[in-house]
Amino acid sequence: MVCKYLFKYATPGITGVSGAMLSEVLLISAPGKVILHGEHAVVHGKVALAVALNLRTFLLLRPQSNGKVSLSLPNIGIKQVWDVAELQLLDTSFLG
């Protein structure tokens, strides 16, 4: 399983992109990895050697009541904010 940790916290009364009520904050974590040999070779059916690291990547999803979605990557100095209404206008036909 890629996501080892999944925590849910109550956050009542916040409406999501689809109009449904979002009531959870999700914290997802996945281990880091190093591919020692064969990183590109695996796309051609060859063998690779990969190992997990004792480092983790975390994703925190928290509903907001202001109609915005924000992405914050403080370790590399990135913060971006989008309006939910604008995101709903995006072409999602590639999702199948």
Image (cartoon, rainbow, N blue to C red):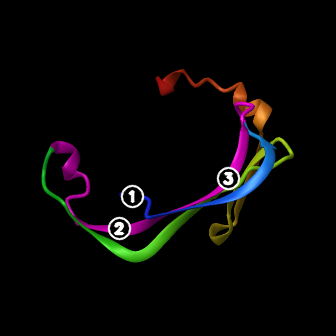
In the image, is 65 to the left or to the right of 39? right
Q: Mark 2, mark 1: which one is toward the viewer?
A: 1
Cβ–Cβ under 8 Å for marks 2 and 1: no
Please, what secondary structure does the residue beneath circle 3 have? strand
| Category of crowding for the residue at label 2, using alpha-carbon neighbours closer than 10 angstroms: few (below 14), some (14–19), many (at least 20) | few
Residue shown at 20% from the left, 59% from the top: 38
Q: Which residue is mark 1?
A: 2
Q: Which residue is mark 2?
A: 33
The dot on residue 66 is none
Q: Position of residue 91 (x, y in %)?
A: 61, 23
The amino acid on which the numbered mark 1 sits, given as a three-letter code, is Val
Mark-to-mark CA distance, 1 and 3: 20 Å
Range covered by the magenta-colored residues:
17-44
Residue 92 placement: quadrant: top right
Please, what secondary structure does the residue beneath circle 1 have? loop
Mark earlier in primary sequence (2, 3): 3
Residue shown at 71% from the left, 24% from the top: 89
Q: Which residue is mark 3?
A: 24
The amino acid on which the numbered mark 2 sits, given as a three-letter code, is Lys
Mark-to-mark CA distance, 2 and 3: 29 Å
